[in-house]
Image (spheres, rainbow, N blue to C red):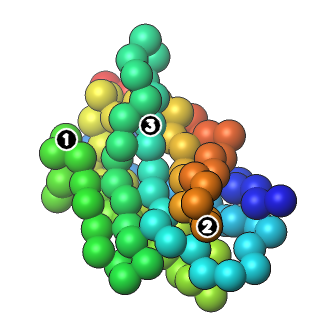
């Protein structure tokens, strides 16, 4: 059974940085795309960034130039470096892994950006 565990969330002041990590267990063959979504209070979950098995990346317009997604295939991990954080970046961040024909989700890590 594939399981995802996120870490690295917390409270940070506006303008600060955080690095989220996500490790996948139960992996036997190669992972396809990996990504990060977030859900702010009272809002729908939205894509933040994604990275393909070939390391092509895609970002939400709101985070372009501030966030960087990366992956370590040997460790089955995906990272999200978040710089110049804004209060509107506050939310629960979920990592995703496309494995076979299934998208797996982590339970999320809370990021709070104070003004």
Q: CA distance from mark 1 to mark 2?
A: 30 Å
Quadrant in the picture for the C terminus = top left
Other residues around mark 2 within 10 Å, as few (<14) / some (14–19) / many (≥20): few
Can residue 37 be seen here? The reply is yes
Q: CA distance from mark 3 to mark 2?
A: 23 Å
Image mark count: 3
Other residues around mark 3 within 10 Å, as few (<14) / some (14–19) / many (≥20): many
Q: Nearer the viewer, residue 84 or 7?
A: 7
Q: Is residue 112 left or right of residue 59?
A: right
The image's mark for residue 62 is: 1
Q: Is residue 65 left or right of residue 57?
A: left
Name the element at disc 3. strand
Q: CA distance from mark 3 to mark 1?
A: 12 Å
Which residue is at a point 23% across and 46% down the rendered structure image? 60
Q: Nearer the viewer, residue 33 or 68?
A: 33
Q: Are marks 3 and 1 in contact (CB under 8 Å)?
A: no
- Residue 42 in picture, x, y percent from top left: 43, 11
Give the residue pinned by disc 2. 100
Which comes before the other along the chain, label 3 or label 1?
3
Which residue of the protein is positioned furthest toward the bottom in this rendering?
Answer: 74
- Residue 65 in picture, x, y percent from top left: 17, 58
Name the element at disc 2. loop
- Residue 27 in picture, x, y percent from top left: 74, 73
Which residue is at a point 54% across and 44% down the rendered structure image? 94
């Amino acid at each position: 059974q594939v399981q995802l565990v996120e870490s690295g969330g917390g409270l940070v002041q506006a303008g600060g940085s955080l690095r989220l990590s996500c490790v996948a267990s139960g992996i036997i063959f190669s992972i396809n795309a990996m990504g990060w979504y977030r859900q702010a209070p009272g809002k729908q979950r939205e894509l933040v960034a994604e990275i393909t098995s070939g390391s092509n990346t895609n970002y939400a317009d709101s985070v372009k130039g501030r966030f960087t997604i990366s992956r370590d295939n040997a460790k089955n991990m995906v990272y999200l470096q978040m710089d110049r954080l804004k209060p509107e970046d506050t939310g629960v961040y979920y990592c995703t892994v496309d494995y076979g024909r299934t998208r797996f989700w982590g339970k999320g890590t809370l990021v709070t950006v104070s003004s």
